[in-house]
Image (tube, helix red, strand yellow):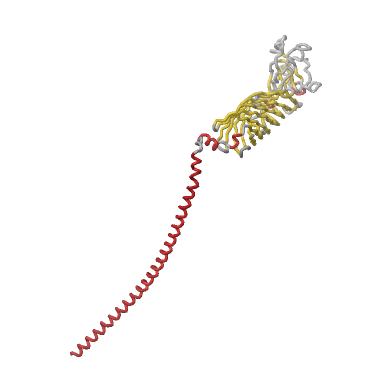
Amino acid sequence: MKTMHIVLQLLLATTALAQTNAVTAQAKAVVTPTNSVAAQSKGAVAQTNAVVAQTKSVTTQTNTVVAQTKAAVVQTNAVVAPVAAKTSATPPVNEAHDQKLVLDPPESRELNRITLSARIGFNISARFGHRLNLDGARYTYLDGYVLPDSTGDFDPTGTFPGITQNWGYDNSARQRDGSPAVGGFPTVAMTRLASGGDPASKSFDNDPSIGAEVVYARRLLERDRWHFGVEGAANYANVNIHQSSTTSENGVQDLYQYFTGTVLPDSPTANGEPYQGRFDAGSGGPQTALISDSVAASAAVPVSVAEKRKFDADVWGFRVGPYVEYQLGRRWALDAGAGLAVAIVNGDASWSETLTVNGVTDPTHSGKSSDSDVMFGWYVGANILFHINERWDLNAGVQYQDVGKYHQNAGVREAELDLSKSLFVTAGVSWRF
């Protein structure tokens, strides 16, 4: 029993020893990584010490640069001190004058300016008035007229309300020979548009007129940004207005009676002109070619009016007046001016008209003339300027001008050129001197 007890104790001791060896092995396994980490920590510490050493070196260099900079500052102060002493002796700067130098353009020192610009005109129109007879009275119809004469249109026979010799017509073959009788009396036919008026007398315009202008300006006064002066200009524009059109619409034929046996003159006459009776009796007495002065009957007819109109004029203009200029800055400025405007108009006017009534075409009537006149009026304008340098500017502007309406006779019509609402756009270059 004792032996077995001893053996049992030996077995227990052996087992405990084996367990102790296992724990020891595990402890060694734990210690090995720990030794590795410690080795790495020592390497990191070595690197950190190296960085610290480098940092100390950089700090030393920085301190050296700072010292050099301080020395340079001392030297600079030594140089600046005498200059500052001289500057303190200079009179104070005039702030207003300094501001003007900043705001005004370099060329403000120059008093004279010449500008050359292209000039385009708008809102210029022309028209031809109604046809006129030999007495200067208007045609009351497209193809003639019936007006009172100097006798008061008294009909001693009492046949008609009144009779007159102050009448005229264009085409006797249609208006006399082709006109129907009314109430047993022969008639003369006069034609008008149902809408009234004369298509050839309407206003018309065309493309903008092209021209040029040269301007001389002299500055007389300067107040900060404001410049005041006077300017004079000469300009030229060619006005070429033309129109061709055909008006077709309903018309009305009014019939005027005359006494049977009365011989009415042919029209056109032997010299190719339409027949035109006069207001005064003249040679032959008032009983020549008398017709009734009242409409006896009317009828609707188709009417077509083909017309051509042209007004060509050379317009030479002059203007003079004060101006004011405001400097927006060193590069930009605005100016405005107003004053007297003068225009010399050399005009050529022409027109033609062909009337067709109920399919019958009358002879074409036309007229033309050349004339000239001097017109007076006023203008107002504004410009924007860009200062390129001390001498040169670019500019663009607009002008409104009113010199009235120009008139000239073109055969039996009066031609009119309306220059009372002219608008001009300019663009050019200026030179200061």
Quarter holding residue 341: top right
Return the residue nearer the eye: 235 or 160: 235
- How many marks overall? 0
Viewed as shown, does residue 398 lie left or right of 243?
left
Name the image quarter holding the C terminus.
top right
Viewed as shown, does residue 407 lie left or right of 71?
right
Quarter holding residue 103: top right
Q: Residue 156, relative to residue 186: is it above or below?
A: above
Q: Residue 28, relative to residue 133: is it above or below?
A: below
Residue most extreme to the right = 270
Name the image quarter holding the N terminus.
bottom left
Residue most extreme to the left = 1
Q: Estimate the x, y position of residue 70 in percent, counting from the top left.
A: 45, 52
Q: Residue 6, relative to residue 299: is it above or below?
A: below
Q: Estimate the x, y position of residue 420 in percent, counting from the top left.
A: 64, 26
Q: Estimate the x, y position of residue 226 in percent, counting from the top left.
A: 56, 31
Quarter holding residue 190: top right
Q: Residue at x 50, y 38 (%)?
A: 89
Return the residue nearer the eye: 273 or 104: 104
Q: Residue 93, relative to residue 63: is it above or below?
A: above
Q: Is residue 29 visible?
A: yes
Residue most extreme to the top = 156
Q: Estimate the x, y position of residue 45 in percent, counting from the top left.
A: 38, 68
Return the residue nearer the eye: 428 or 388: 388
Q: Is residue 245 visible?
A: no
Return the residue nearer the eye: 234 or 238: 234
